[in-house]
């Protein structure tokens, strides 16, 4: 077994390294911020500045995602993937060692860029290295790392917080990331530089039909639906009457529920159609978003966490997988447009969220607006099906 795990060309080792990389790039460098937010809010951080930090983090991710589109050579991808891993560790150390607001702002932008290198570029490396005839199911396993990244970073944080501070938790997370990064970098590389010329296909803007534009707009609304709870979920639960202290349990459930979601959603998409599954998933996400606005029942709010975790990861896999199918031989422009739309939603949502919380004194209005925006996304998809019912490739 050990020999298999140390074999760079073993599918088991490649998938494990991909999941560990996601834990470093997303769990440690991004989602741990959500986990530790309630503790940082009690100490020195204001909710408004937390929203600004989240927006800048996603702006960095958006820049990295667009940048990654232009990395054609696999050897260059390996280089930037390694940079992403290193950046994820160093920016986490910044949060552990200082409370300087300017340094935090800069570190969150850079951490966002690093996360894009790890998730997007790392995902491309995993796909190239995997030795399967059909890689769709295997990539579903790889993207389960997003759920693992939430659960593992949450467990590490809560273990340290039993006797330590949020700063100690950031130290522990960066230490964990440093240790596993050696394995990740070793496995997700090549024995020798690959000499593979990319096949170039003529660029055609004809792909941007009204159907595809509506799909992109729907993905924008999902960017909004994702980011509000991704930033504030523990604090939302803690703010409800009688539920203070339960926020981190809710966040752990998000991670656990998210682990199988990409695998299951892609399987259902193959059976029932991507757009149909996307619509159902977004409807379930709306229910999850609204539950904290209507109830302080602990079980319903833990259900809200489960609905969120089980939908947002699956929706990313569904949209991008379907977009790749529609794009055919030249997916770069379409994937770039989809990523940009999702990223704009991610950047804007934390800002309106904190503005509404500051004005109304609770998260209810933020949740109403977010649910409404996701609902508009469903309307886009229903209209798309009506005007141009396309059979899936």
Image (spheres, rainbow, N blue to C red):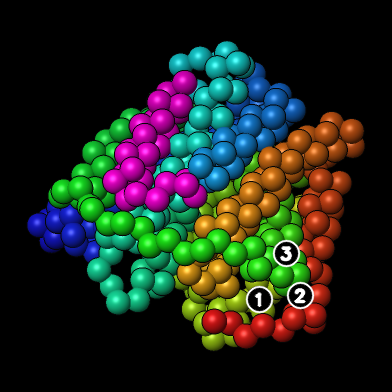
Indicate the quadrant containing the N terminus: top left, top right, bottom left or bottom right.
bottom left
Looking at marks 1 and 3 on the same chain, the residue that comes earlier in the sequence is marked by 3
Mark 2 residue crowding within 10 angstroms, few (<14) / some (14–19) / many (20+): many
Looking at marks 3 and 2 on the same chain, the residue that comes earlier in the sequence is marked by 3
Q: Position of residue 263 (x, y in %)?
A: 46, 70
Is 246 on the left-hand or right-hand side of 25? right
Pick out the residue farthest to the left: 3
Pick the residue in front: 287 or 51: 51
Question: Cβ–Cβ below 8 Å for labels 3 and 2?
Answer: no
Q: Is residue 151 visible?
A: no
Q: Quadrant of residue 337?
A: bottom right
Q: Is residue 135 above or below residue 75?
A: below
- Give the secondary structure at mark 2: helix
Is 161 on the left-hand or right-hand side of 80? right
Q: Position of residue 111 (x, y in %)?
A: 50, 33
Residue at which label 1 appears: 275
Residue at which label 2 appears: 384
Mark 1 residue crowding within 10 angstroms, few (<14) / some (14–19) / many (20+): many
Q: Position of residue 259 (x, y in %)?
A: 46, 61
Residue at which label 3 appears: 213
Q: Is residue 69 above or below residue 390?
A: above
Pick out the residue farthest to the right: 360
Question: Cβ–Cβ below 8 Å for labels 1 and 3?
Answer: no
In the rendered structure, which segment of residues is drawn in magenta? 68-94
Question: Cβ–Cβ below 8 Å for labels 1 and 2?
Answer: yes
Structural distance between the alpha carbons of marks 1 and 3: 14 Å
């Amino acid at each position: 077994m050990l020999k298999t795990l140390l074999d760079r060309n073993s599918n088991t080792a490649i998938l494990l390294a991909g999941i560990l990389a996601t834990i470093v790039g997303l769990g440690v460098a991004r989602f741990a911020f959500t986990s530790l937010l309630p503790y940082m809010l009690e100490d020195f951080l204001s909710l408004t500045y937390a929203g600004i930090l989240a927006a800048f983090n996603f702006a960095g991710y958006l820049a990295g995602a667009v940048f990654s589109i232009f990395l054609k050579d696999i050897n260059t991808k390996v280089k930037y993937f390694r940079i992403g891993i290193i950046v994820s560790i160093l920016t986490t150390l910044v949060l552990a060692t200082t409370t300087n607001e300017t340094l935090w702002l800069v570190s969150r932008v850079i951490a966002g860029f690093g996360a894009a290198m790890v998730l997007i570029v790392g995902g491309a490396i995993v796909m190239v290295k995997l030795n399967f005839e059909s890689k769709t199911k295997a990539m579903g396993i790889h993207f389960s790392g997003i759920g693992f990244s939430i659960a593992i970073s949450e467990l590490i944080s809560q273990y340290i917080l039993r006797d330590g501070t949020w700063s100690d938790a950031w130290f522990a997370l960066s230490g964990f990331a440093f240790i596993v990064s050696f394995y990740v970098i070793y496995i997700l590389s090549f024995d020798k530089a690959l000499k593979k010329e990319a096949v170039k296909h003529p660029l055609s803007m004809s792909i941007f039909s009204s159907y595809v534009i509506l799909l992109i707009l729907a993905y924008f609304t999902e960017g909004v639906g994702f980011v509000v709870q991704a930033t504030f979920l523990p604090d939302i639960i803690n703010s409800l009457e009688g539920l203070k202290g339960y926020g981190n349990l809710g966040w752990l459930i998000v991670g656990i529920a998210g682990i199988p979601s990409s695998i299951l959603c892609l399987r259902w998409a193959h059976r029932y159609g991507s757009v149909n599954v996307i619509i159902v998933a977004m409807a379930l996400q709306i229910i999850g978003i609204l539950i904290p606005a209507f109830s302080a029942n602990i079980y319903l709010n833990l259900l809200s966490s489960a609905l969120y975790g089980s939908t947002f990861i699956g929706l990313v896999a569904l949209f991008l997988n379907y977009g790749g199918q529609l794009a055919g031989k030249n997916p770069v422009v379409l994937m770039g447009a989809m990523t940009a739309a999702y990223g704009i939603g991610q950047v804007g949502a934390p800002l309106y969220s904190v503005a509404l919380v500051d004005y109304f004194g609770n998260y209810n209005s933020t949740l109403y607006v977010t649910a409404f925006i996701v609902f508009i996304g469903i309307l886009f998809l229903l209209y798309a099906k009506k005007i141009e019912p396309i059979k899936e490739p």
